[in-house]
Amino acid sequence: MSFELESSAFSDGGAIPPKYTCEGADTSPPLSWSGAPAGTRSFAIIVDDPDAPDPAHPKMTYVHWVAYNIPATVTSLAEGAGKGSMPSGTDEGLNDWKKAEFGGPCPPIGRHRYFFKLHALDTTLKLSHPTKADLEAAMKGHVLEKAQLMGTYEKVKK
């Protein structure tokens, strides 16, 4: 069985509903996964946008969410989990707004891609409000498998 990540709110490659963006409730979408490899001790999730600020001329990858030490027994995150409702034991790192929570898509121009990357780890991590780079460095050598879901979003033109 392969390690897979999905959302009931949007399909892989599909449009993220406005509800989960700065134009809506700005809350995290529901996520679920299956097929975690044997030996998984925890999960880590990173959500980022490699198309910032303009998909035609990207200059940076903007980080929307960093969470880790999600217990190995967990197979889903409910809608809104990234705004203070994470499973017990989970820790969150800093997004590019310098907040330890989910920050929804809010592209300044064009349709951006948002990658939800779930890592199955063979350990739990001892970190304190890490950035994406800190978390990735701490995960080195501990990633058993990675699952990914990509959604897109473009602001509604007014």
Image (cartoon, helix red, strand yellow):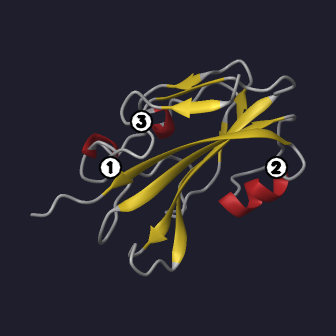
Of callouts 3 and 2, the N-terminal one: 3
Residue at image location 45% in from the left, 71% down from the top:
52
In three-dimensional space, the C-alpha distance between marks 1 and 2, rounded to whole angstroms, equals 28 Å
Mark 1 surroundings within 10 Å by alpha-carbon count, few (fewer than 14), some (14 through 19), many (20 or more): many
36, 30: nearer the viewer:
36
- Image location (x, y in percent) of residue 95: 56, 58
Quarter of the image where one finds residue 40: top right
154, 131: nearer the viewer:
154
Dots 3, 2 in contact, CB < 8 A? no
**Left of 52 or right of it: where is 100?**
right
Mark yes or no: residue 131 visible.
Answer: no
- Image location (x, y in percent) of residue 10: 37, 36
Q: Amino acid at mark 1?
A: Thr
Mark 3 surroundings within 10 Å by alpha-carbon count, few (fewer than 14), some (14 through 19), many (20 or more): many
Q: Is residue 43 above or below residue 96?
A: above
Residue 139, disc: 2
150, 131: nearer the viewer:
150
The residue where tag 1 is placed is 21
The residue furthest top is 73
Q: Is residue 55 above or below residue 119?
A: below
The residue where tag 3 is placed is 29
SS category of the residue bearing label 2: helix
SS category of the residue bearing label 3: loop
